[in-house]
Structures are given as C-alpha cells and as structure tokens.
Amino acid sequence: MKIKDIKKKNYEDKNFKNYRENSIKKELLSDDEGNFSIIIACLLLISFLILSIVVLNTAIQEKNENKEIISSNEYQYIMKDYIRNIPLLEREAMEELSDYVIKNKKPCLDSKDDLKEIIDEKLSLKNQEYYNDYNIQINSSLTAIENTSDPFSYKFKVHVYSVKNDYSFEDIVSSDVDCINLKDPVPLLYCKDYHDIRFNDSSYIYGNSLSEFLRRNGVENNSNYINASSPFIIRKCPYDPYKHHGDDGGKIMKNCRDNGYYHESRDGACYLCRLEGKSGCEHYGFETFINPHKTNETGLVSACGSDHVIFSDNIYPGVEVVYNCENGLNEILYLDPHGHKVKYGMGGY
Ligand SMILES: [Zn+2]
Ligand SMILES: [Zn+2]
C-alpha cells in the first residue's frame, strides 16, 4: 500500500468514528428529552392529585364545620321536630301490633310489652336518622303505657336524652295516642275455630261461627245469631249521653248500628286488652253490639248482644229490642232489660 492510500484510509476511519460518536450522542440526547417529558408529566399529575385531595378535604371539613356550628335555636327546633314524631311512631306501633294479631289470629301475651319492643326499635332507627342528618346523639326508650279516663286513648311515656356539644336535652315525653280506626280482634280471636267468620273493611260477618260458639257455651236460641254482624273498626259513638239512642223512634240507634260505633263501658275490654284476646278487663273500656240477622219473628230471647257479654264466661240473656222495621223485617238487638236497655235509653222498645 502506498503512503497516500494509507493516509486516505486513516482519514476515512477518523470520519467514520466521528460520525458514530455524533450519532450516539444524538440518541442519548433524544432519550434524555423523553424521560424528562415523562417526569414532568408525572410531577404535574401528582401535583394535580395532591391539589384535588386538598380541595376535597377542605370541602368536607367545611361541611363538617357547618354541621358543628349549630345554634341553640336550631338544636331546640330539631329536638321539637323529634318529639313531634314520637306519637306518630307510637300510633304506627299500635297499628302494626293489631295487624299482626288479626293476620295470625293469635292474641298477644302482653300487648304493652310487645308495644315497647316495637316502639323502642322504631325510636332507635329514628335516633340513627337524626345522628346521620344532624350529628345529634339521642337515646330514647318507652317507659310506660297508661290507661286514661278516656278508654279510647292511652298515655305513652318516652324517656328522651340528647346531647350536642354544649347543648343537652332530657325529658319524659308524654303523648296521648288513641285507638280510633284500629281493628277490633276480639270476634276473630273467639270465633276463629268455628266455621265461616269473615270480615270486610268495616264489619265482621259471622256466618255460622257465632251461633256454633254460643251453642258450645250452652246458649239457647243460638241460631238467632246465624249470619250476625258486628263492627270491625273501632269508632267512638257520638250519641253521648247514651240514653239518647232511643230518641227519634229508633233512628239514633239505627244510625249507631249502621256506623258500627263503640261505647264507653266499665265491663268491656280496653283496646290493648282486646289485643290480648280479652273481652273484659280491669281498665275502663268499651263495648259494641252484635247485630243478629234481620227477622220477622217477634218476642225472641237470646244472648245479650253486647260484645263483652257474648264473648265471656258469663253469657246472660237479652230480650228482643226492635229499633227499625223495613219491608216487614225487623232490625233488632238482644239487650238485658235492666242493664243495657236502660243505659241506651231503649226502655220503650
Ligand atoms: Zn251508639
Ligand atoms: Zn284493659
């Protein structure tokens, strides 16, 4: 090889080496730029996330602080609202218990105990609701159910204790809860084992059940009560004093029976004892009448038609009282001459 050729070769080798170095540098440089972009993107994302968390936290904190800032007036308002709800829960509980007894055709062992259980559960749900909505801690439970001088009404007492920051509340909340428009389970509980007792929205229709029940209990003329009927829903009779039932040629009594009214009575069971399957109790209670089927016969005698007499261990007789007559058919009640006939002013019938 000539020297010139060798020089040329060296020159070419050098150029090639420079080209290689440059191209490696370029590659390295473009890799660095890529990594750099990814790092920047990651940093931006992380900053954004941190910012979002901070903003969100601040929002939640503000909301919580708003919850904390509750004035004395607001606290009182919320507690008043809570107390307003208590009688509604109590009435709901009575309705549920009565539906349960009717549905299962089974009396309660202790209706007040059962009501306490239902009401305490309802209160505990309500308390949780108030804690979630207002962050107010409430403890409450039923302490008593008392009979009153009005047999259609009970006094329910609930102990309520609540606390919120500097505020607290403690009281026995006493509410009057009535049993008007609730279902009367007594006829069903007494006649369920006999054939054919039915009820609709307003009345029991006994078919043969009551007549069979009376026959089993040694009552003569029990067949007068075939297809009898009596009220299903508790309604308070407005014709007070009751001796006015005999006024207006029997129209008052007719209206009373058509509406299925109940009357205050020392001998009749109160509502909560009716749920226990009792027709009479030691409390001041109420009574209604069982209407025999319409008849064209007169002068009949059968069991006295007050429900606390029919569904008792001591069924006594009543004489026929015709209070309405249409198309030759009499609408009648059987009433004992010196008791119910007098009480309801039906002496002249
Ligand atoms: Zn009446
Ligand atoms: Zn009672």
Image (cartoon, helix red, strand yellow):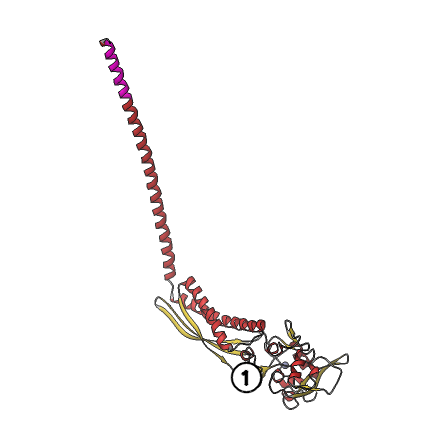
**Can residue 10 be seen by looking at this rendering?**
yes
Which quadrant of the structure image shows residue 2? top left
Residues shaded magenta: 4-19
Q: Quadrant of the N terminus?
A: top left
Q: Is mark 1 within 8 Å of ligand 2?
A: yes
Q: Which residue is pictured at 42% across the width and 62% down the height?
A: 132
Q: Secondary structure at mark 1?
A: loop
User: Residue flagged by tag 1: what amino acid is it?
Assistant: Cys
Q: Is residue 13 inside the magenta stretch?
A: yes
Residue at far top of view: 2
**Can residue 252 be seen by looking at this rendering?**
no
Q: Eyeballing the image, is 137 above or below 325?
A: above
Tell me if 199 is positioned left or right of 146 in this view: right
Q: Is residue 127 inside the magenta stretch?
A: no
Which quadrant of the structure image shows residue 171? bottom left
Magenta stretch, main secondary structure class:
helix
- Residue on which the image places disc 1: 281
Q: In terms of depth relative to the viewer, which is nearer, 93 or 64?
A: 93
Horizontal and vertical percent for residue 268? 58, 83
Tell me if 8 is positioned left or right of 180 in this view: left
Q: In terms of depth relative to the viewer, which is nearer, 330 or 100?
A: 100
Q: Which residue is pictured at 52% across the width and 70% down the height?
A: 92
Q: In terms of depth relative to the viewer, which is nearer, 302 or 75?
A: 302
Q: Residues within 10 Å of mark 1 (few under 14, many from 20)?
A: some
Horizontal and vertical percent for residue 186? 59, 78
Horizontal and vertical percent for residue 174? 46, 76
Horizontal and vertical percent for residue 150? 54, 81
Q: Which residue is pictured at 65% across the width and 73% down the height?
A: 198
